[in-house]
Image (cartoon, rainbow, N blue to C red):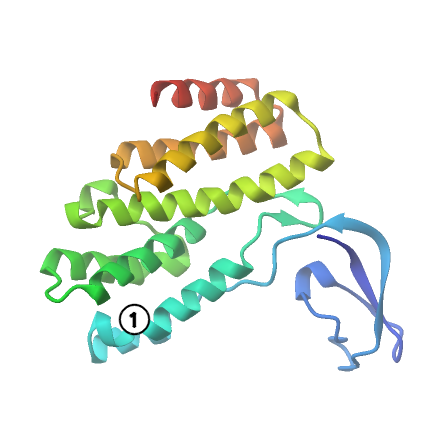
Amino acid sequence: MEIRGERECKDCGRQWSYYETGSVSCPYCGSLRSVGVGDRERHTAAQAVLDLSAHRAAVADGTVRDAAPALKSDLREYIRKTGYIHGGELLPLDDTSLSAHELLHAVDVVARSNRPSDDEQLYVLDLLRGADEGTRPDKQAVPSSLTDARGLAYANALEAYHADLTMWLDDHPDREARTTLETLSNHLKRVEALEGDIPLDESDALVRVARDIYTYLTDDDLDALASARDQLSALF
């Protein structure tokens, strides 16, 4: 959506950035009476902060299954608020978002299993340990039973990024980027149809493609665009 990035309080007259606070209430006097000022800009990035400390404590005192409902609820809320356009500026696909998506899927698999393996539970704990800091385990650490979860999680994260990137391109047309993005979209549809059952190398390649498209658009880096296309071609 397009919103005015600045708010002005009708009571105290002070201004603040809505892009930074995500609130129409005045941070200075608390008044709810404010108006938007300045130009409208595309903005999808809400104030999303991922803090998993309480869930780490819950798992330490119990089990992954016990902690799963509250953990999944907070992860879904974070993912819902995560956007990639901030006041008209395109943002990169960050590791915290990828980790949040993967943790959501991995926790669901373990919580629904009658007898989750030690490897599965340890992997979830590893994800939980660093997801809110954008730390993702290497693909070599992913248990085979959670490969599909990682593939589908990355596809979901990339779909969300694809939606915002498409919206951003409506305001900043680029035929080459849009064509490459359409090819990426076709791959994501295939991954979702396969329910994430793809090699881990392919999941990582799709993430790199999205990031290369971002680099091309923000840095006018033709090598990054060529890299994105080469990686997509290699996946056929």
Q: Quadrant of residue 34?
A: bottom right
Residue 132 drawn at (x, y percent): 40, 60
Q: Describe residue 227's horizontal placement relative to residue 118 as left or right.
A: right
Q: Quadrant of residue 187?
A: top left
Q: Residue at x 60, y 20 (%)?
A: 176
Q: Is residue 17 above or below residue 24?
A: above
Q: Is residue 173 above or below residue 104?
A: above
Density class for disc 1 (Cα within 10 Å; few <14, some 14-19, many ≥20) is many
Q: Is residue 229 above or below residue 65?
A: above
Q: Describe residue 33's horizontal placement relative to residue 127 as left or right.
A: right
Q: Residue at x 76, y 49 (%)?
A: 41
Which residue, as the protein is rendered here, is positioned at the far front? 193
Quarter that holds the C terminus:
top left
Q: Describe residue 234's horizontal placement relative to residue 20 as left or right.
A: left
SS at mark 1 in the image: helix
Q: Is residue 137 visible?
A: no
Q: Quadrant of residue 230?
A: top left
Query: Which residue carries the number 1 mark?
Result: 68
Residue 58 drawn at (x, y percent): 28, 77
